[in-house]
């Protein structure tokens, strides 16, 4: 994380927007909150040395393994020691280390180590590096229903992000799903490190499964031609396990749910690698094992906010891939990008369709750009609930046919459940919605 030149300035100030919280609290009716400033999170403990783990986050690999990702200032062995009680590390695994350069910035040493096999629904204690004093713990997801996902897009790193993270931490979730736009570093690489530190308390305890948004591209023509450099280096996801050749799209199974992460900013036309992979992946779903299928994209295919209308990642990707998802009877499509919340009915090809997926925009994590508060008037019939507020969603799949979706508005720093609905598999009542095999 060596920073040469003037970029060091960005690290020097700690902007605590928490001060805003007290300022805007205590109103009777809901007052739409203003933007909050970017937080710059420095190392949490002063006694961290150059090989102390920081920015620790975890992600599932297959059904019984976990990837531990962390960063150190200087080079050290990528060893994770772990076990089922604190301070006792019966097991050990070694991983790989990488780094990247971006303009004048050189990243720290980025370590990725896969551990397991692990038991489902179990707590493990671990440390990164053989003599680190920092102990972390995580809980593995359950092997069966119920399973609870926290869902949040366009997270950023502001006072609102902090409020959202607090509410997610209280939700007792099993896994976090993020439909793109993570750090809002926007070329300023030390903000990726800051973001890693901000999310570590949560992301080191539960798997954070992410896909990328436009803010991850960070490509500068002629100067830095490779897109997604920081994202791919820092947020390595288990793409090989699902037969994908790219970190930008992949899938995995967790507790009866097949989760598909798509890339809105990589090729998606019918001739593309992503399209062919998706087609094959959908064909391989075993409905007895995973009755539910959930898809995440960044740019929403359905959107009645005035923000981000007419973008090709919405229109062309939908035209290319919506039929595939529809015929595979995907249950829910989560998107971000629009900084607001919106839930549609079951929909296909622009119209209500009992066998189509529910589309949800959940791009309201708390980023520095603020909310997208203007909506198309009148509201289209297919849009059921829409509101521009920061918050997050919880998707609790209780069994093979029922799932509870709730949207939690941050509402002046206390968590409020603002939209709540049961999703039922339409195939229970409508034979036409059964998957054709
Ligand atoms: C699934 O959960 C729903 C909601 O709790 C319940 O009404 C339904 O009976 C459950 N189905 C089965 C097969 O247990
Ligand atoms: Fe975006």
Image (cartoon, rainbow, N blue to C red):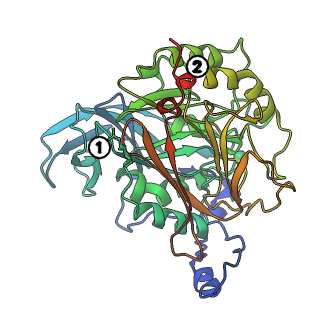
Residue 340 visible in rendering: no
The residue at which mark 1 appears reads as 140
Binning the other alpha carbons within 10 Å of mark 1 as few (below 14), some (14 to 19) or many (20 upward) gives many
Q: Give the side of residue 208 with respect to residue 121, left or right.
A: right
Towards the viewer: 73 or 337: 337
> For residue 282, which numbered disc appears in the image?
none
Query: Tag 2's secondary structure?
Result: helix
- Please identify the quarter of the rendering in which residue 114 is found: top left
Task: Give the percent coordinates (x, y) of residue 273.
Answer: 64, 15
Residue drawn at x 69%, y 38% as measured from the top left: 217
Distance from label 1 to label 2 (Cα)?
27 Å
Query: Tag 1's secondary structure?
Result: loop
The residue at which mark 2 appears reads as 278
Task: Give the percent coordinates (x, y) of residue 371.
Answer: 73, 62
Q: Is mark 2 within 8 Å of ligand 2?
A: no
Residue drawn at x 71%, y 40% as measured from the top left: 299
Towards the viewer: 280 or 267: 280
Task: Give the percent coordinates (x, y) of residue 269.
Answer: 74, 18
Residue drawn at x 28%, y 38% as measured from the top left: 79
- Please identify the quarter of the rendering in which residue 345 is found: top right
In this view, 403 is above or below 158: above
Task: Give the percent coordinates (x, y) of residue 298.
Answer: 66, 40
Q: Give the side of residue 49 with respect to residue 125, left or right.
A: right
In this view, 196 is above or below 46: above
In this view, 157 is above or below 411: above
């Amino acid at each position: 994380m060596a920073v040469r030149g003037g970029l060091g300035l960005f690290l020097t100030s700690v902007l605590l927007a928490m001060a805003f919280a007290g300022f805007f609290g205590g109103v009777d009716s809901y007052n739409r909150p203003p933007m909050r400033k970017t937080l710059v999170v420095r190392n949490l403990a002063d006694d961290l040395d150059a090989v102390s783990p920081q920015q620790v986050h975890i992600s599932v690999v297959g059904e019984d393994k976990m990837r531990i990702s962390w960063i150190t200032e200087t080079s050290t062995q990528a060893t994770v020691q772990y076990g089922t009680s604190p301070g006792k590390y019966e097991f050990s695994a070694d991983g790989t280390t990488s780094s990247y350069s971006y303009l004048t910035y050189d990243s720290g040493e980025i370590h990725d180590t896969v551990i397991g096999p692990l038991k489902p629904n179990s707590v493990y204690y671990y440390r990164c590096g053989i003599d680190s004093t920092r102990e972390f713990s995580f809980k593995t997801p359950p092997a069966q229903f119920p399973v609870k996902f926290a869902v949040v897009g366009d997270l950023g790193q502001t006072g609102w992000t902090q409020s959202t993270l607090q509410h997610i931490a209280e939700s007792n979730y099993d896994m976090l799903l993020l439909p793109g736009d993570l750090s809002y570093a926007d070329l300023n690489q030390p903000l990726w490190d800051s973001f890693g530190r901000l999310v570590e308390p949560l992301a080191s305890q539960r798997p954070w499964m992410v896909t990328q948004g436009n803010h991850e591209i960070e490509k500068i023509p002629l100067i830095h031609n490779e897109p997604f450099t920081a994202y791919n280096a820092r947020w390595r996801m288990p793409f090989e396990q699902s037969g994908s050749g790219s970190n930008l799209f992949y899938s995995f199974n967790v507790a009866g749910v097949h989760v598909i992460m798509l890339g809105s900013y990589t090729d998606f036309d019918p001739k593309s690698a992503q399209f062919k992979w998706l087609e094959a992946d959908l064909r391989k779903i075993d409905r007895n094992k995973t009755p539910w299928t959930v898809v995440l994209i960044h740019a929403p295919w359905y959107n009645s906010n005035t923000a981000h209308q007419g973008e090709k990642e919405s229109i062309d990707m939908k035209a290319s891939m919506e039929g595939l998802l529809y015929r595979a009877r995907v249950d829910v499509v989560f998107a971000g990008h629009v900084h607001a919340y919106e839930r549609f009915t079951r929909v296909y090809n622009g119209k209500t369709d009992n066998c189509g997926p529910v589309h949800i925009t959940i791009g309201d994590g708390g980023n520095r750009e603020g909310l997208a508060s203007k909506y198309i008037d009148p509201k289209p019939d297919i849009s059921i609930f829409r509101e521009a507020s920061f918050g997050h969603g919880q998707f609790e799949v209780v069994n093979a046919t029922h799932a509870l979706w709730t949207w939690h508005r941050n509402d002046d720093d206390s968590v409020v459940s603002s939209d709540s609905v049961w999703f039922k598999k339409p195939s229970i009542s409508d034979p036409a919605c059964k998957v054709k095999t």
